[in-house]
Amino acid sequence: AERVLGYDLLSLCLRGPRAELDRTRHCQPAVFVASLAAVEKLNHQRPEVVESCVAAAGYSVGEFAALVFAGALGFAEALYAVKVRAEAMQAAAEAVPSGMLSVIGRPETNYRFACLEARQHCESLGIENPVCEISNYLFPDSRVIAGHLQALKFLQENARKYSFIRTKVLPVSGAFHTRLMEPAVEPLAEVLKSIEIQKPLVCVYSNVSGKKYMHGEHVRQLLARQVVSPVMWEQTMHAVYQRSQGTEFPYTYEVGPGRHLGVILKKCNLKAWKQYNHIDALEDEEAAET
């Protein structure tokens, strides 16, 4: 990873500074490598789990790790693509004051109408072609809305009107997975054209469609589109865990930093979550057991 990136990623992960690690250009490669390191740890501890895996999915940049795990992409080529993606997304984020807002709503919440009124508010402030749209589908009654900062501020101030129970500004630098990331599509697409992509050996689900990748060219097309498309994670969870009544749920392993996907799984499918485990490459095994 250090050779591909040109800096000491391990040192940055272990020692920081935190502000540098949190920057998009460093954070994405760190999540990618730490996720695959956790896979290696799981493979060392319980090889039968990896050998019997039937499906994989990754959230945003994690999709690259899922595709490497499934044999569709090589590690070094995928990491280089992630590097280009991260740098291009950071540049796009710095071009426009924008961000992301996590929202928990009610069954009657109309997110699209709220986004429409937030865009109209931005237009009244003189902002041309304002962006405010759903960028992540997390679990029932939870979305991430991304766009211009003025739009997100408007939504927070009018939370009660739109039946938002809770809103929280996410600690990110831009409106990822919206059309504000359009400048990042071409650099990533160019890299993806130059690398070999195979059909995944196990089912990998796409963030763009919430469905399985069919072949290598399919991967190439959707990975570029993913940057400007909402992450269909809730839909992916339903697709992965859909089974007939009485069928047992599989074991699920979240590999990588944090347990956020486990929290979402619990909200999407409590029965599937009961078979959930978390593996963190940097977590000390003895500390984890205690």
Image (tube, rainbow, N blue to C red):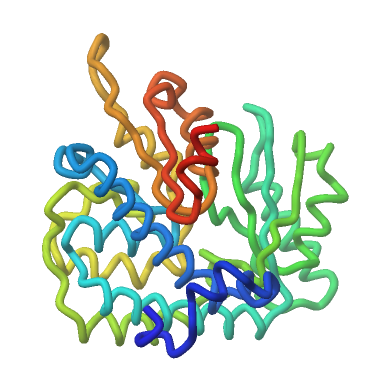
Q: Does 200 sit above or below residue 192?
A: above
Left or right: residue 238 versus residue 167 is: left
Q: Residue at x 32, y 81 (%)?
A: 189
Instruction: Between residue 72 and residue 193, name the one nearer to us.
Output: 72
Instruction: Between residue 254 and residue 290, name the one nearer to us.
Output: 290
Provide residue 192's location: percent of width, then percent of height.
26, 79
Left or right: residue 58 versus residue 148 is: left
Q: How many marks?
A: 0
Provide residue 178's location: percent of width, then percent of height.
54, 66
Left or right: residue 146 versus residue 258 is: right
Left or right: residue 76 versus residue 265 is: left
Q: Quadrant of residue 240?
A: top left
Quarter of the figure that contains the N terminus? bottom left
Provide residue 74's location: percent of width, then percent of height.
21, 72
Q: Residue at x 48, y 73 (%)?
A: 10
Q: Does 248 sit above or below residue 138?
A: above
Provide residue 288's location: percent of width, then percent of height.
51, 39
Quarter of the figure that contains the C terminus? top right
Residue situated furthest front in the rendering: 286
Q: Residue at x 36, y 59 (%)?
A: 37
